[in-house]
Image: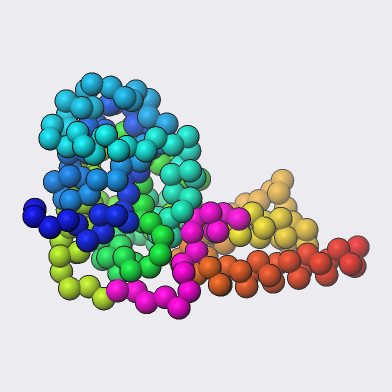
Amino acid sequence: MTNPHPLRAKVRIVLVETSHPGNIGAAARAMKNMGLDRLYLVQPVDYPNEKAVFRAASASDVLDQVVVCASLQEAISDCSLVLGTSARQRRIPWPLVTPKEAANKITEHGSAAGDIAIVFGRESKGLKNEELQQCQYHVNIPTSEAYSSLNLAMAVQVLSYELFCASEAEASARVWDQLPATNTDLEHFFGHLEATLAEVGFHDPDNPRQLLTRLRRLFLRIEPDQMEISILRGFLKAVNDTTRRKS
C-alpha cells in the first residue's frame, strides 16, 4: 500500500481486557496490513510484553504508539461513532450490521467531526452488555455454525479489510450542519435523562426493567448531533425546573 488509508487519522481499534499479549501483536499486524495504526488497549492483562512485539512482526510501530486506557469510556469518550463487535444477539435487539455494512457506515461518517472506534471484547467472553450499550451499532461476523469461534486478530483483520475496501470505493460523505455528538455528550445526556425520569416518577431506579436500555437504543440509533443533544438537555432542564417549582 503506497497511499495512507484515508481514514487512518480517525479510526481507532479498541481492544478490551485482552488476556494474551500475542493477540495484541497479531491485531497490530492485521491493522497495519490494512493501513490502520491507532490501537487503544483497555486494561490489558499483560502488556507491554515481548510476545506482543514478536507477533506484531513488522508492525511494531503500531505498538509504539499504543494508547492504554483505564476504561472503555476513556477510550471512546471523544468518538462520534462507536461500533462494538458481538458474537450473538442480545435480549434487546440493537442495530446489527455485517462487517461490510459497518465499513460503509464508517466511510460515510468519515467527513464528520470526532473519531470512530471499533471495539473488540475479551477473547473468552467478548463485550459485556453495558459496554455494548455504549455503541451505536453492533457488528457480527458471519461464520459457519460448525465452528464459529474467531481469533481476536482474525476479527480485527476482517473489519479492517472491509473498511479498507469501502474506503477505496466511491462513498458518499455524510454532511452535517452541526457536529455529531461525542460519546461523552451522549453519556451526560443519558445521565440527565435517567435522573429526570426518576424525578418525575416515570423511572424506578430500584426496578429499572429495560426502560433505560431501550431509550439508549433509541437515541443511539438516530445518531444525534451536538445541537440536538443540547436541545434535549434544555428540555430536560425545563422539566426539572417545573417539577421543582411544584414540589
Give percent across and percent down for residue 190. Answer: 60, 57
Tell me: 25 left or right of 184.
left
Residue 156 horizontal side relative to residue 125, left or right: left
The colour mode here is rainbow
Residue 107 as seen in the image, left or right of residue 197:
left
Indicate whether 91 appears above or below 39: below
Q: Residue furthest left?
A: 2
Camera-side residue: 8 or 131?
8
Name the spot of residue 78 as percent of width and height, x first: 46, 53
Q: Does the rendering let one see residue 13?
A: yes
**Relative image position of residue 106 (x, y in whole percent):** 30, 62
Residue at (20% x, 27% y) in the render: 53
The picture places residue 25, in percent across and down from the top left corner, at: 22, 32
Magenta segment includes 57: no
Q: Is residue 233 above or below residue 29?
A: below
Q: Main secondary structure of the magenta part?
A: loop
Residue 14 against residue 134 in the figure, above or below: above
Residue occupying image coordinates x 15% and y 65%: 168
Q: Quadrant of the C terminus?
A: bottom right
Identified at 15% across, 61% down, the residue is 165
Q: Is residue 57 above or below residue 35?
A: above
Observer able to see residue 85: no
26 with respect to 97 (left or right): left
Examine the image and state in which quarter residue 185 appears.
Answer: bottom right
Q: How many numbered tags mark residues here?
A: 0
State which region is magenta. Answer: 173-188
Say which residue appears at 72% left-offset and 53% top-offset.
204
- Pick the front one: 235 or 36: 36
